[in-house]
Amino acid sequence: MARRSLRPLAVSLLLATASAGAEVKDSGASGFTVENVRTVVVDADTAWRALVEDVDRWWPKDHSWWGTASTLNIEPRAGGCFCEIARDGARQAQHLQVTHVEPGRMLRMVGGLGPLQGMGLHGALEFQLAPADGGTRITMRYRAGGYSPDDLSKLAPVVDRVQAQQLAGLVEHLRQRAR
């Protein structure tokens, strides 16, 4: 009985550290860098497969164009698409384009996420996977910038919170798979 009650507590403590690895690395009027870091208790190959093959299962649907009425997909190859297709097949969006693939180590994609795309901003989203005690450290870094009549540094904390939520979705998905 004691073992069963400790597992939820351990999971809660792991999830509570989610924001501890979130950080606005730098920001200015023309751009920013945000970084979120989490450690998962799976090997890098398992984390990689979940990252690229299961994105529709872990990416928060409230941070997609059509929510549950669409599917998300990452093609893990140079020139591949991180795309969303509405279930009607007519509405489609390219969130990012894949530019660098090292299975089990790194995925880099470029473009403007969400409303940044409509603002004409551009960014590089990178997932780095590295060995860590008992698992894999996942670093999610997004550098975005471009011309805007507004001060982009004001967007950095918002984007950081959203990306912390996205990475938390991947971590929770991996936790569920490990059960």
Image (cartoon, helix red, strand yellow):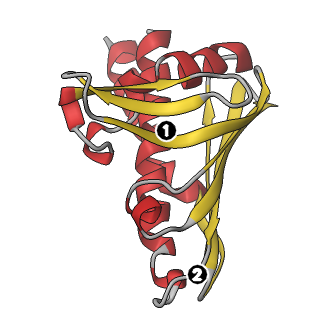
Image coords of residue 115 (percent x, y) = 38, 62
Local packing at callout 1 (Cα closer than 10 Å; few below 14, some 14-19, many 20+) is some
Q: Residue at x 22, y 38 (%)?
A: 66
Q: Which residue is mark 1?
A: 14
Q: How many marks?
A: 2
Residue toward you, 6 or 66: 66
Between discs 1 and 2, the one toward the N terminus: 1
In the picture provided, is 36 more to the left or to the right than 148? right
Measured along the vertical axis of the image, is residue 163 above or below residue 98? below
Say which amino acid is labelled 2: Tyr
Q: Is residue 176 left or right of residue 22?
A: left
Q: Position of residue 130 (x, y in %)?
A: 79, 33
Q: Is residue 52 visible?
A: yes
Quarter where residue 60 is shown: top left
- The x and y percentages for residue 64 are 32, 42
* Residue 120 left/right relative to 131: left
Q: Secondary structure at mark 2?
A: loop
Which residue is drawn at the image coordinates 40% and 34% (left, top)?
59
Are discs 1 and 2 less than 8 Å apart at CB?
no
Q: Name the residue at the front extreme.
A: 90
Is 158 above or below relative to 99? below
Find numbered disc 1 in the image and state the secondary structure of the residue it sits on: helix
The residues tagged by marks 1 and 2 sit, at their Cα atoms, a distance apart of 39 Å
Q: Amino acid at mark 1?
A: Leu
In the rendered structure, find residue 147 and report the number of the disc placed on it: 2
Q: Quadrant of the N terminus?
A: top left
